[in-house]
Amino acid sequence: MTAFTLDNPAGVPSSPRKAFSNVAVIPLGERTLLMLAGQVAWDDDHQIVGAGDLRAQTRRVMELIGQVLAAHGATLADVVSLRTFLTDISHIREYGEARNECFQGLPAPTSTTVEVSSLFVPEALIEVEATAVI
């Protein structure tokens, strides 16, 4: 018996060649844990949105996170943790400002942000993983 399910919600770009699932859904009795795979700012054709623009990419990533959450009855208000990978940490303020726009009026989730030398999509400036509890 599997204690979790893996899902690629309709309307959310899945990984090329279905290399990974967008979310693991883990029942915890009265609650459910949603562990989202890292999202990059791509469109349905796996083309990066906002090339060279961290703010635009952050907004797109948060939009995709919101879509994955919505498919499971959750919203950004249910996010308890974010793990962010930036290709240039000197732009952390831009990321923070764009992220805060998306979480406006909500408690800030726990957050870890690190710099990486590159991401799996060369044009991507950011990748964000999220964990939510519903």
Image (tube, rainbow, N blue to C red):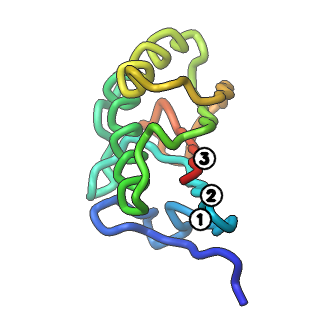
The residue positioned 53% from the left and 62% from the top of the image is: 23
What amino acid type is highlighted by mark number 3? Answer: Thr
Task: Give the x, y percent position of residue 62.
Answer: 40, 37
Task: Give the x, y percent position of residue 80.
Answer: 61, 38
Tell me the CA gap for discs 3 and 2.
7 Å
What amino acid type is highlighted by mark number 2? Answer: Leu
Query: Residue 97, located in which quarter of the rendered image?
Result: top left
Query: Which one is in front, 72 or 111?
Result: 72
Report whether 36 appears left or right of 64: right
Kindly identify which residue carries mark 1.
24
Label 1, residues with CA under 10 Å away: few <14, some 14-19, many ≥20:
some
Say whether marks 1 and 2 touch (CB < 8 Å).
yes
Task: Give the x, y percent position of residue 56.
Answer: 31, 26
Q: Earlier in the sequence, mark 1 or mark 2?
A: 1
Choose mark 1 or mark 2, whichever is in front: 2
Query: Residue 1, located in which quarter of the rendered image?
Result: bottom right
Report whether 40 appears left or right of 131: left
Task: Give the x, y percent position of residue 130.
Answer: 57, 44
Q: Earlier in the sequence, mark 3 or mark 2?
A: 2
Kindly identify which residue carries mark 2.
33
Query: Residue 71, located in which quarter of the rendered image?
Result: bottom left
Tell me the CA gap for discs 1 and 2.
8 Å
Q: How many marks?
A: 3
Kindly identify which residue carries mark 3.
131
Does residue 83 lie above or below 32 as drawn?
A: above
Label 2, residues with CA under 10 Å away: few <14, some 14-19, many ≥20:
some
What amino acid type is highlighted by mark number 1? Answer: Ala
**Mark 2: secondary structure:** strand
The residue positioned 63% from the left and 36% from the top of the image is: 83
**Mark 1: secondary structure:** strand
Say whether marks 3 and 2 touch (CB < 8 Å).
yes
